[in-house]
Image: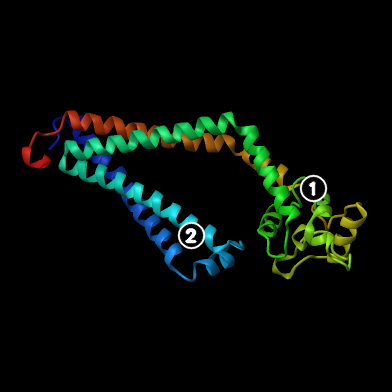
Amino acid sequence: MAEGKVASCSRYILIILNLIFLITGILLLGMGIWIVASDKAMDTVKEKFHLTVNVGTLLSIGYAIIGVGSFMFLVGFCGCCGAIRESAIMIGVYIIFMVVLLCGELAATVYTALEKSSIETKIRQQLLSDVENYNNKSNLDFVQAKFECCGADNYTNYRNSIYFTSDDSMTTFVPDSCCKSDGNKGPVDREACQSAAKSGLPNDNLFTTGCFNIIKGLIEDNSAILIGITAGIIVIELLGIVFAVFLCRNRTDYDYYDD
């Protein structure tokens, strides 16, 4: 057993923290493997999240989740087993993993802070591109219905959309997701909504706020929460490193532990 009450406490804290890490990694691994291997993953995404994702993107997401899950599993395994056995080698590997993870998170945080305006510009450009190339099975429908917005800047962005400029009937000027909806029954008054989009005289049936402004506002409104969560994670990881170093320096020196 680790020498001293503090070392013993550090040992048990490491076991608990890394057991959680280990279980989370296993769950993510299972989810990633299911996404990659299951034929029903695509249908589940469409039904549960109302999103249309091509096969390549879905597989990339699956492999990314597998990668994250594998890393978390390795970190949790080394930390948990290292603390249980008081193995200097496994604790050392755990410390290296945690330092790499911490450096990556700090680098990502600094990059996000420095490139905030650039990231916002890219989001807006992507939204504009999605509007221009809109089709009747676009993920924009989910975004617009969820946040009650229309277009990137506003509903007039759709006047340059390929989908609507090619409509010979000239009766549809914005997607139905830009109109006030009554649950799964569709727009409350589709005709009034489309008429407002055509005339440029909006009424209560048409969402006029751009999705970019709403997304930007949500991020800014919740920035304090995001910073707090990030800081909390970093503090926990720092404590994990400190506990691991302390345990490694005060472990019981049994030779068979490191065989």
Q: Is residue 42 left or right of residue 243?
A: right
| Nearest the eye: 131 or 105 | 131
| Image coordinates for residue 195, horizontal then vertical, percent | 90, 60
Instruction: From the top left corner, tell me how far across and down residue 77 is, in percent.
Output: 26, 47
| Marking on residue 219 | none
Q: Which residue is mark 1?
A: 154
**Residue at position x 35%, y 51% from top?**
70
Q: What residue appears at the point 49 percent right and 56 percent down from the top-left corner?
A: 60
- Horizontal side of 50 relative to 130 (left or right) equals left
Pointer 2: residues within 10 angstroms few (<14), some, or many (20+)?
some
Q: Quadrant of the N terminus?
A: top left
* Image location (x, y in percent) of residue 102: 39, 34
| Callout 2 secondary element | helix
Mark 2 to mark 1: distance in Å? Answer: 33 Å
Residue 95 seen in the current view: yes
Q: Which-is-in-front pick, marks 2 and 1?
A: 2
Residue 104, compared with residue 61, is above or below; it is above
Instruction: Reply above or below: 55 against 245.
Output: below
On the image, numbered disc 2 is attached to which residue? 59
Q: Amino acid at mark 2?
A: Leu
Quadrant for the C terminus in the image? top left
SS state under label 1: loop
On the image, the x and y values in percent for residue 109 come to 50, 33
Q: Residue sitting at 69 percent across and 56 percent down? A: 140
Q: Determine the residue positioned at 48% across, 36% down.
A: 230
Apparent side of residue 71 relative to residue 87 in the rendered image (left or right): right
**Picture layout, residue 43 above or below residue 8:** below
Q: Is the residue under label 1 in contact with that under label 2 (CB below 8 Å)?
A: no
Q: Residues within 10 Å of mark 1 (few under 14, many from 20)?
A: some
